[in-house]
Image (tube, rainbow, N blue to C red):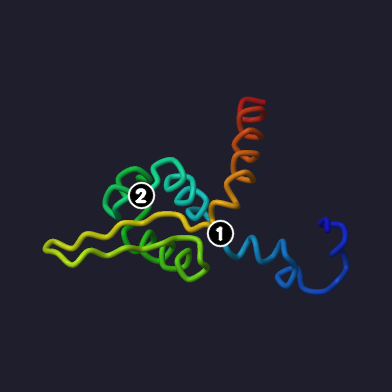
Amino acid sequence: MSVADYKGKGNIQETPFGYTLSVIGGKWKMLIIYLLAENQTVRFNDMKRRIGAITYKTLSAQLKELEADGMVNRKEYPQVPPKVEYSLTAKAETLLPVLEQLCEWGVKNQNN
């Protein structure tokens, strides 16, 4: 189905497009997914350092939402200091071709 198939069918949040936006929408989620796709497994502090402007609280909240939506795996190691690693789930990996297309669009249009 296309976006046009859902035109005029009620609340947009109830459409597949609305669902997709609820999972990856916002300022940070696609950046987190992109970072995990590029690096396979990333520790929390390394992710914070690579993203930059995000706060620890916001990064933690975004990762919890992505985990709840089945997009991110969280693996905690029982050691001191605590070690937590994040990686993409198989569900998130199905989204990577779409993100690649978005990147290609950015390459073509960034300087226009």
Q: Depth check: 26 or 32 in front?
A: 32
Q: Residue at x 45, y 51 (%)?
A: 32
Q: Quadrant of residue 105?
A: top right
Q: Which mark is residue 41?
A: 2
Q: Look at the picture and state if 37 lies above or below 90.
A: above
Q: Look at the picture and state if 14 lies above or below 106.
A: below
Instruction: Determine the residue located farthest toward the top in the rendered image.
Output: 111
Q: Position of residue 101 (x, y in %)?
A: 65, 39
Q: Depth check: 96 or 7 in front?
A: 96
* Quadrant of the image containing the N terminus: bottom right
Q: Neighbour class for label 1 at 10 Å: few (<14), some, many (≥20)?
A: few
Task: Find disc 1 in the rendering and name its residue.
Answer: 91
Q: Look at the picture and state if 109 lies above or below 13.
A: above
Indicate left or right for 41 with 11 as reference.
Answer: left
Indicate left or right for 6 with 18 as reference.
Answer: right
Q: Position of residue 17 (x, y in %)?
A: 72, 61
Name the amino acid, label 2.
Answer: Thr
Q: Position of residue 99 (x, y in %)?
A: 59, 44
Question: Going from the N terminus, do you reach mark 2 or mark 1 first?
Answer: 2
